[in-house]
Amino acid sequence: MKRSFRIESDCLGIIDRIKAIDSDYFIEFDLDKQKFVLHNSSQRNSYCLTFPFDQLDERSVDYVLQTRVQNADDLFKAMEAENERLQKQKIKQVLNDFKEKMYDS
């Protein structure tokens, strides 16, 4: 059974700032996972995302803004660019390792 509770307010006003992005947003704290979770009451399945932070702060607001559906194209482009960068880095590392083994022989 899921154990969580809704966060109605906080001392930094993060909840209010997130609700300003979309008034249907609400945040719960999942007791089992010890994570904050964003929901949208206008959706049939209200789950939107799990925050990767241990506390609600400015990063949480930025994270909600980044992951909104309206920003999906930009987010996918950034993910593709990062994946390409990582792939090039990995290829470079493999080539360097191969060169070291060749010269060590």
Image (tube, rainbow, N blue to C red):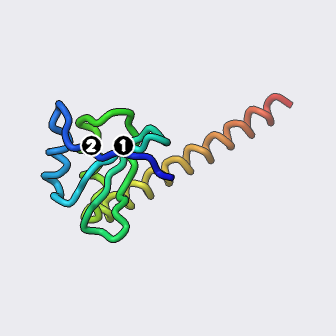
Where is residue 53 drawn, in percent x and y?
Answer: 38, 37
Q: Residue furthest bottom?
A: 44
Residue 105 left/right relative to 79: right
Viewer-closest of 104 and 50 = 50
Distance Cα–Cα, label 1 vs label 2? 7 Å
Q: Quadrant of the C terminus?
A: top right
Q: Secondary structure at mark 1?
A: strand
The image quarter in which residue 47 lies:
bottom left
Residue 91 left/right relative to 29: right
Identify the residue under disc 1: 29
Viewer-closest of 15 and 82 = 15
**Count of picture labels:** 2
Q: Residue at x 20, y 48 (%)?
A: 18
Where is residue 35 drawn, in percent x and y?
Answer: 41, 41
Q: Residue at x 14, y 45 (%)?
A: 16
Q: Local crowd at mark 1 within 10 Å, few (<14), some, or many (≥20)?
A: some
Which of the two discs, 1 and 2, labels the residue nearer the N terminus?
A: 2
Amino acid type, label 2? Ile
Q: Residue at x 20, y 35 (%)?
A: 10
Q: Residue furthest top?
A: 104
Residue 16 left/right relative to 90: left
Identify the residue under disc 2: 7
Proximity of marks 1 and 2: CB atoms separated by less than 8 Å: yes
Where is residue 57 drawn, in percent x and y?
Answer: 25, 35
